[in-house]
Image: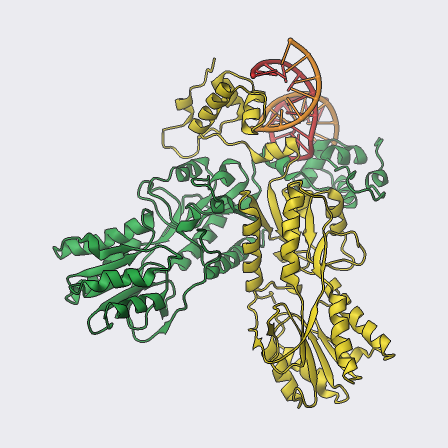
Chain colours: A green, B yellow, C red, D orange
Amino acid sequence: MGSTNVEAMNNSNNNIPPERKWTIYDIAREVGVSTNTVSKVLNRKPGVGAAMRRRIEEIIRHVGYTPHIGARGLRAKRNACIGVTVPAPFDVVPVSQSFLLWLFTLLYEVFSDKGEYICFDLNPFAAGKDVDYSRGVSERLFKACLLVGPLAPNDVRLSQIHRSGIPYLTLGRLDAMPECSSATVDYVAGAYMSARYLLERGHRRVAMLKAFQGFQPGIERRRGYERALAEFDLPVDEALIKNVTFGGRDLAHRVEDLLQDHSVTALIECSATEDGASIREGMLRAGRRPGENIEVVSWTYQQDASVLREESAHVWLPVREAATEGVWQLADWTYGRRNGPINIVYQPELYETCGEKEIEKPKRLFEPRE
Amino acid sequence: MGSTNVEAMNNSNNNIPPERKWTIYDIAREVGVSTNTVSKVLNRKPGVGAAMRRRIEEIIRHVGYTPHIGARGLRAKRNACIGVTVPAPFDVVPVSQSFLLWLFTLLYEVFSDKGEYICFDLNPFAAGKDVDYSRGVSERLFKACLLVGPLAPNDVRLSQIHRSGIPYLTLGRLDAMPECSSATVDYVAGAYMSARYLLERGHRRVAMLKAFQGFQPGIERRRGYERALAEFDLPVDEALIKNVTFGGRDLAHRVEDLLQDHSVTALIECSATEDGASIREGMLRAGRRPGENIEVVSWTYQQDASVLREESAHVWLPVREAATEGVWQLADWTYGRRNGPINIVYQPELYETCGEKEIEKPKRLFEPRE
DNA sequence: CTGTTAGCGCATTCAG
DNA sequence: CTGAATGCGCTAACAG
């Protein structure tokens, strides 16, 4: 016996706000059933007669009723979105344009059929330090979460995410948390094979240009490098390891500094800047001619391209390939087709370079703030 | 008198799921106050002593409590995210890579300080037809909503969004809804000035290559074109208006078809494909040499670049400029610094072309599905 | 300044 | 097959 009339609630009058929202109660009253029955229809659950079901669906469609996603999540403990967040302060890792496009495309391929919401948390991009990148999980907005960017060794929020039980995936590992769900490349192996390659060719003073200082990917690079040196009974000379940051204008200078010492005869370029031009400039300024008085191994994220044309070899880090498989597994986990955590490690591969196309310096999505 | 112990709830044991979530009740009990007081602390509202406030904050931090965003929204009628959605089936308007990057950057600039969630609804990207692109609003997930893409003249969901009262912005107008909140360019004027320019130069058979058939931007193009013809007492010849779609491989052929009729001496290129190469190819195949036996006006979204080097003039559509102002106003509306609806209309500008740089064909983010 | 109470909109017991 | 009652976690009235 609805005292409410369908037409009356669709406020035809054109004053802006009135527009009372329909609730499941209103629908139930309108149809003359209980909210339980309506709920079953909404959730496509059994226990409602076919005729009744259709009548209810009809009304729902007619009045344009949509359940409140917050109330639903609250009650059913089901969250709303697939989340994307960045576990590092943003100035540490400005994401490249091509990466964002690639990521968006991947998420589209994996999740558009399900009609998901993809939710980017801008909190890590905010000015303040130490903002909570994991709030999308703790606020129970995210039903699953993808962590993009380097992890700090002392990260505490990751274990909260882990314990929360929601499907999640990082694109890197964390020493302190081997059980962490991740899809990554073995950076230790990458650094090891880079160094080893050069050592085997007789070099004894091998410099390394690296990034992500103070973050796990930086630590892993160093570890592989040290391991290779140890096998050759060589000491680690801190002066040979140079850290660079993204957006730093001084990349060429840092390379120049590093190569002033003419006992250095080899360079591992694993800075992830992919800025071949600056590195070349630094080498030239230090009087180095690749292939003559310096030998270079550089890292790349594309199998068939290199950062520096003049290098002797490049190491391909199949980061995107690992991430792609990881995100598919994340979807499986999200939809109950498997359990977590995800554990994907791709191995890097070393190729002796023979004039591949040189990649362009990637554009950063937004430059780090001053 | 907390019967619960802080340490006990942080399950130190390493079995995966237990991890009971803290609620506001738990915090209140732990501190020995009511939930109301805790709530005030959480929401930075007055009415709590400074000492008490700090004690509560301390506990909250210590146990890592975060409010449930759904419950919060449900009670306070405050939604969680800034939403982005596409009001057209996705095959109608594959968004370009550069547009997505631009949009993402804009949203970052406008909303990252506030630490918002930016939520993309993938529903419009799903396979099924007529999916509800507005559900982010009706499900009350979005606190504000940006509609990206062309609107259909018979769109019904937009008025639902409008009446819902949440801040929203479309990047185009809708005839049926002049009160709609929008930031757009006057496409009618663009088509009018394009046609008028050519008519004034003596052309009487002016062809038009357009897109968005059946959508508002397509309608507006036609309207401006017809208006100009009418002022010259010229009839509209349907054969001179050709629609193209994005991702269509046949763009060159369609241009060729259009220009087979040698009474046609002018072309308005407002297809938004920005695919100069294909258009040039089509003209050549039809035996046309721009400046000799055909005169072209093309549309562009960058002030200093044109689609076709050989054109006589180009019309600049300041779409991004309008959208930028619109999104800033959307933020103002969202944070109560102004009211809606937003009403921004930028005027296009016609430039006689003198060898600007020609723009590249944009890459589509994902190609339309077959 | 703080506590008590109610209810946001929904899904899920448990009865009938 | 359907209805009544309960509470998810939180905020906002209103008392004290």
A114 or A221: nearer the viewer: A221
Q: Residue at x 52, y 59 (%)?
A: A105
The answer to whether any part of residue A3 appears in the image is: yes
Q: Position of residue B130 (x, y in %)?
A: 70, 56
Q: Is residue B124 left or right of residue A181?
A: right
- Give the image quarter of residue D8: top right
Q: Residue at x 43, y 41 (%)?
A: A129
Q: Is residue B38 left or right of residue A230?
A: right
The answer to whether any part of residue A336 appears in the image is: no
Q: Position of residue A32 (x, y in %)?
A: 80, 33
Q: Residue at x 51, y 21 (%)?
A: B50
Q: Residue at x 68, y 36 (%)?
A: A39
Q: Position of residue A20 (x, y in %)?
A: 77, 37
Q: Position of residue B122 (x, y in %)?
A: 60, 53
A137 or A250: nearer the viewer: A250
Q: Is residue A107 left or right of residue A253?
A: right
